[in-house]
């Protein structure tokens, strides 16, 4: 009797093949090595200020005369940031930059791993999809990632802190989540957004632990500069923060002069609502510079705050809290968590493109959904395909390396990077609750339930049959 030939497995999808993985690793290795040399030995940027700030705090570098408490404080960060800066400031300058760069890369890799674990939620995707989605998200936002690596990955570290907060809360480890949230708030104040979110969902231990962590880090400089100086620095930061909320003009933030490089949502809305006179810092004498509405500064400020409040009400109230209250601790809030992570960037009064790396989780989840659909023989959702194409245009085509310095400033004035971040937030919130495979399982469970009803049997009576999510 002739032997039956073994079935031939179907050909692997291109993004699951070893050739694809080798190509991605080769490209990433080139980016990491070239950018590593630039970041450590060529660039300066903000990381140099953090280095000197930390060394001055612990006495490894002379404080400019006359000595004053504010010389230990790097505006506009919370006072405790000086203590965080000092943890590595004992290293020589280039070693400090190299250590931060490696920490930034490790934070990016760890964040992607954790977001996959959160997205999996008991519904694993096909083999090869997580790697393809991670590489897709990184390359989609590569200009933002490279800009942050120029600064030795500081915002990627913040990304990991926020990732840890959501992951630990999902696993019931609220105190650990609170510690990470407190460190994130001291690292950059915008993660304060998560405190009311966690509080309204009953994560009181996380909120309390975050408060204790912030307080401890805020007074920690007293070990080096004394209680009086530490109190003055903290009071100055609180006063600066309160003044920022009462400027009455969406183009101002109290930290720096208005710049087109600032891609924060408030200044972006100011660009839409206001008309700048020729002597204004945001006015450009260029034929492509078009202005829109001409509201008074106070009216524009109220309108911008109303838009921001509406956005928060939708993401935090309608999406995140409603899902948590309806489904309990097991609620699938990964999409909302990714949107909140991105909002921590664009709601900051000072948002340059390196800060927008906090949109990586949103990009990852969108890419993950698309690749899973492809591997199951479905086309990606049309809105996702159009949205990703729009992000590519906004991030790559309007970049300085393509358009040149003059045109890039004009495009920055239109807040193209803010638009890309908002598109990603919209895409991740519009994702279906389950992936393609999970959706198929959901339909199968429903058909089994319908059959049991027709047979007159009680629903969920047989072991192994569970209520669909």
Image (cartoon, helix red, strand yellow):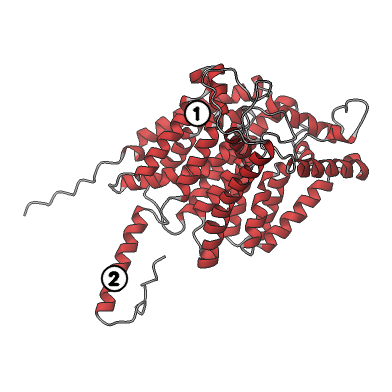
Mark 2 Cα shell of 10 Å, populated few (<14), some (14-19), many (≥20):
few
Furthest-left residue in this view: 1
Camera-side residue of 411 and 181: 411
Q: Quickly name the residue at label 2.
A: 448
Q: Earlier in the sequence, mark 1 or mark 2?
A: 1
Which secondary structure lies at badge 2? Answer: helix
Based on the displayed image, in which of its 4 quarters is residue 105 positioned? top right
Residue 185, position in %: x, y? 70, 47
Q: Identify the residue at horizontal 68%, vertical 29% (top origin).
A: 258
Q: How many labels does the image show?
A: 2
**Element type at marker 1?**
helix
- Asked if 86 appears above or below 231 in the picture, the reply is above
Image: 51 above or below 162: above
Question: Residue 439 placed where, x, y %?
Answer: 35, 58
Task: Name the quadrant containing residue 316.
Answer: bottom right
Residue 29: numbered disc: 1
Task: Please name the residue shown 87% across and 43% down the image.
Answer: 230
Q: Is residue 182 left or right of residue 365?
A: right
Comparing marks 1 and 2, which lies closer to the viewer? 2
Q: Taking the image as drawn, is residue 100 in sight?
A: yes
């Amino acid at each position: 009797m002739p032997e039956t030939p073994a079935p031939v497995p179907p050909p692997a999808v291109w993004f699951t093949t070893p050739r694809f993985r080798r190509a991605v690793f080769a490209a990433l290795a080139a980016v990491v090595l070239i950018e590593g040399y630039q970041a450590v030995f060529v660039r300066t940027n903000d990381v140099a200020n953090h280095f000197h700030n930390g060394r001055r705090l612990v006495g490894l570098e002379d404080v400019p005369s006359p000595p004053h408490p504010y010389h230990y404080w790097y505006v506009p960060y919370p006072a405790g940031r000086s203590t965080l800066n000092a943890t590595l400031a004992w290293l020589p300058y280039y070693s400090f930059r190299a250590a931060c760069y490696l920490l930034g890369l490790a934070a990016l890799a760890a964040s992607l791993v954790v977001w996959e674990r959160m997205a999996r939620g008991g519904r694993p995707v096909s083999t090869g999809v997580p790697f393809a989605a991670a590489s897709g998200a990184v390359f989609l936002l590569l200009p933002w990632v490279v800009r942050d690596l120029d600064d030795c990955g500081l915002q990627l570290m913040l990304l990991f802190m926020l990732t840890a907060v959501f992951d630990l809360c999902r696993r019931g480890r609220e105190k650990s989540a609170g510690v990470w949230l407190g460190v994130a708030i001291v690292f950059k104040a915008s993660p304060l957004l998560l405190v009311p979110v966690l509080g309204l969902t009953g994560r009181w231990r996380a909120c309390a632990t975050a408060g204790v962590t912030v307080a401890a880090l805020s007074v920690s400089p007293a070990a080096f500069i004394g209680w009086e100086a530490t109190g003055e620095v903290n009071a100055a930061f609180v006063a600066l923060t309160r003044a920022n909320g009462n400027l009455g003009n969406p183009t101002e933030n109290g930290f720096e002069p208005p710049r087109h490089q600032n891609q924060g949502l408030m200044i972006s809305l100011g660009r839409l609502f206001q008309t700048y006179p020729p002597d204004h810092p945001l006015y450009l004498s260029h034929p492509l510079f078009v202005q829109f509405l001409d509201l008074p500064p106070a009216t524009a400020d109220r309108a911008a705050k109303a838009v921001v409040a509406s956005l928060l009400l939708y993401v935090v109230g309608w999406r995140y809290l409603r899902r948590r209250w309806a489904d309990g601790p097991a609620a699938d809030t990964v999409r909302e968590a990714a949107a909140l992570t991105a909002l921590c960037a664009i709601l900051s009064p000072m948002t340059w493109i390196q800060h927008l790396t906090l949109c990586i989780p949103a990009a990852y989840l969108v890419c993950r959904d698309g690749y899973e659909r492809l591997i199951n023989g479905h086309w990606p959702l049309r809105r996702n395909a159009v949205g990703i194409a729009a992000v590519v245009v906004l991030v790559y085509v309007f970049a300085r390396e393509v358009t040149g310095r003059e045109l890039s400033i004009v495009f920055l004035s239109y807040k193209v990077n803010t638009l890309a971040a908002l598109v990603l937030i919209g895409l991740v919130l519009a994702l279906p609750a389950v992936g393609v495979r999970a959706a198929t399982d959901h339909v199968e469970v429903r058909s089994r339930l319908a059959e049991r009803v027709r047979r007159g049997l009680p629903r969920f009576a047989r072991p192994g049959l569970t209520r669909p999510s």
